[in-house]
Image (tube, rainbow, N blue to C red):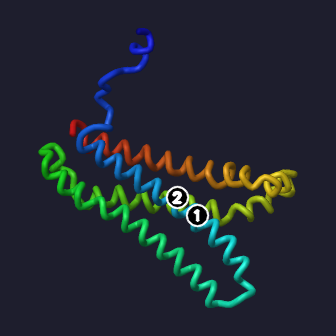
Amino acid sequence: MAFRKIIKTGDPDDIRTGFAGAVWDIVKMSSLIGAFVAFFSGMVLKGKLLMLAAESWTSILLVLLVLFLALFLSLGAVLLQLPGLIHRKREHQEAQNLSDTRLILWVFSTFAVSWFSTFFFSVTSDITAEAMRGFGMGEYLYDFPAALIFFYVAGPAIVVNVAFGSWIRGNIRRLLPEV
């Protein structure tokens, strides 16, 4: 009983239901898809380009082509959800003040921020480990690559994504208060 008093049931600020919940779900999904593709693209790019640098330009271009193809396919998967969301918006009178452009911008900007932040941290993780050798931590990070991935790639990327996601969520709450 005391637990129910601590946690409010029926929070008016909750955006998990209705049209606002559908917008939030697509925004979260675009962030997850962007981070997932960027992490593996960054790790592959870092490893394969260093390995193939001595071989030929053709192999390097092939790796880059595959990575850009993965980027555009994942972006396409995110953007394919938008027509259904825009159609669903027409069913809600309260959501008519929200422009389709703003809806598309929320989804695309979340994907872009998630992709670029995760890609940056995954590609530059070795540079960070080299820079940390002077502080006595570089060897530890090379001995345990999972620690490097967690503390430098996943940690900062999560912080960036949560900060941007909370800003987007605030906009959804402000523009779709009772939808």
Q: Position of residue 78 (x, y in %)?
A: 37, 61
**Snapshot quadrant of residue 40:** bottom right
* Image x and y of residue 56, in percent: 68, 90
Q: Residues within 10 Å of mark 2 (few under 14, many from 20)?
A: some
Q: Is residue 121 left or right of residue 19?
A: right
Instruction: Kindly identify which residue carries mark 1.
Output: 40
Q: Amino acid at mark 2?
A: Phe
Q: Residue at x 86, y 56 (%)?
A: 134
Labelled pair 2, 1 in contact (Cβ < 8 Å):
yes
How packed is label 1: few (under 14 Cα within 10 Å), some, or many (20 or more)? some
At mark 1, the secondary structure is helix
Residue 92: x and y in percent read 15, 45
- Up-down relation of residue 5 to residue 13 (above or below): above
Look at the picture and state if 35 lies above or below 50: above
Which residue position is annotated with label 2? 36
Residue 3, labelled with which disc? none
Check the image and report above or below for 89 versus 56: above
Nearest the eye: 55 or 136: 55
